[in-house]
């Protein structure tokens, strides 16, 4: 019985959240790029990536590793 319930919930979640992407609004892009040195270039790049994402193509997202400032314990 639990297996049927879990499989139903898994199918429901996968159908609900599959193939959906939420892009940034213009306000969010401007808010993010306000802190950058080259604000206009940042806005242009993010708007270009948003349009590519809305078309359904893949984009690269840089991953910045976390550095612990306190040192290792």
Image: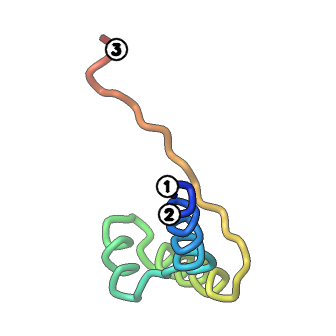
Q: Which residue is mark 3?
A: 72
Taking 60 as reference, is 36 left or right? left
**52 in relation to 38, above or below:** below
State the residue lying farthest toward the front: 1
Residue 43 is situated, as x and y percent measured from the top left of the image, at: 47, 79
Taking 15 as reference, is 34 left or right? left
Q: Residue at x 44, y 81 (%)?
A: 24
Q: Residue at x 67, y 69 (%)?
A: 59
State the residue lying farthest toward the right: 57
**36 in relation to 56, above or below:** above
Near mark 1 (Cα within 10 A), the count class, few <14, some 14-19 or many ≥20, is few
Q: Which residue is mark 1?
A: 2
Which of the two discs, 3 and 1, labels the residue nearer the N terminus? 1
Which of the two discs, 3 and 2, labels the residue nearer the N terminus? 2
Q: Which residue is mark 2?
A: 5
Q: Residue at x 73, y 78 (%)?
A: 57
Residue 7 is situated, as x and y percent measured from the top left of the image, at: 58, 62
Tell me the quarter of the image containing the C terminus.
top left
Tell me where residue 60 sits by quadrant.
bottom right
Asked whether 59 or 16 is in front, the reply is 16
Q: Which is closer to the viewer, label 3 or label 2?
A: 2
Residue 42 is situated, as x and y percent measured from the top left of the image, at: 48, 73
């Amino acid at each position: 019985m639990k297996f049927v319930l879990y499989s139903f919930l898994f199918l429901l979640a996968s159908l609900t959240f599959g193939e959906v992407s939420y892009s940034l609004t213009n306000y969010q892009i401007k808010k993010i790029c306000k802190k950058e040195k080259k604000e206009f270039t940042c806005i242009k790049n993010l708007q270009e990536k948003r349009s590519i994402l809305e078309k359904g193509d893949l984009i690269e997202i840089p991953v910045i590793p976390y550095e612990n400032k306190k040192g290792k314990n």
